[in-house]
Amino acid sequence: MRRQITVPCSLLCGAQFASYNPRLAWGDAVDERILVVDDQCDVADALAKLITALGYEAKAVYDGQHALDEVARSRPDMALIDLGMPGLDGYEIATRIRELRGGLPMILVAVTGWTRREDKQRAYECGFDLHVSKPMTIETLEELLNIIDPSRCALMAHGSQAGHVDRLSGRLSKGA
């Protein structure tokens, strides 16, 4: 089933709408496949299992090359990518995914402990749409999944305001 991308209000509070990332066009149709990329296998597997339990199709991979292969093969709609990985790091993965996808809609989320302003800016420059600080709460995960399918995320209906989520331009930092 095709969906419209809708960004939750809690991710946009205080946003500078004139500075959004144009790759993520409002109203782009997406499916519900999520790729989790983290070199810590237990972290990637646990997050993929949680996403699956929430009703989405999720797959975990543990390095950059497998991430690129999976993007080319299955065309996921969202990728949650750790920045600090050996070999191809998250920045390089995002850059290559943008080249592979050729402008097709895919939401790239940096999920990382790297939270300095320079880290966030570099993430956006490399093609990430969102930046989420580790550890990620269930409420933040549901906000991210709500972008793909607003009807599934029960906590969003209750006005969740959780998480450190930076939105598109790097100018919004929730909770900072």
Image: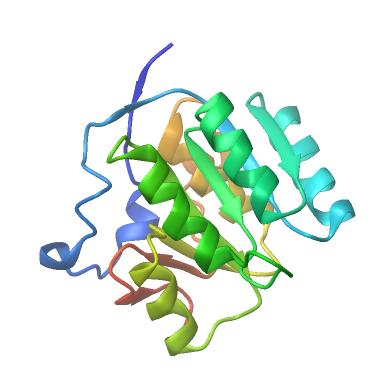
- In this view, the residue in front, 167 or 76, is 76
Q: Nearer the viewer, residue 175 or 39?
A: 39
Answer with left or right where residue 6 lies relative to residue 61: left
Q: Left or right of 168: which side holds 137?
A: right
Residue shown at 37% from the left, 60% from the top: 127
Residue 17 position, x and y percent, is: 15, 62
**Above or below, 108 relative to 106:** below
Q: Identify the image quadrant of residue 168.
A: bottom left
Residue at 80% across / 36% down in the picture? 49
Q: Is residue 45 left or right of residue 27?
A: right
Given residues 7 and 60, the one toward you in this image is 60
Is 151 rendered above or below residue 139?
above
- Percent from the top left, x then y, of residue 148? 44, 33
Q: Quadrant of the N terminus?
A: top left
- Residue at image point 50% right, 47% down: 144
Seen in the picture, residue 167 relative to 48 is either above or below; the reply is below
Toward the left, the furthest residue is 18
Residue 154 in the image: state x and y as whole percent: 57, 34
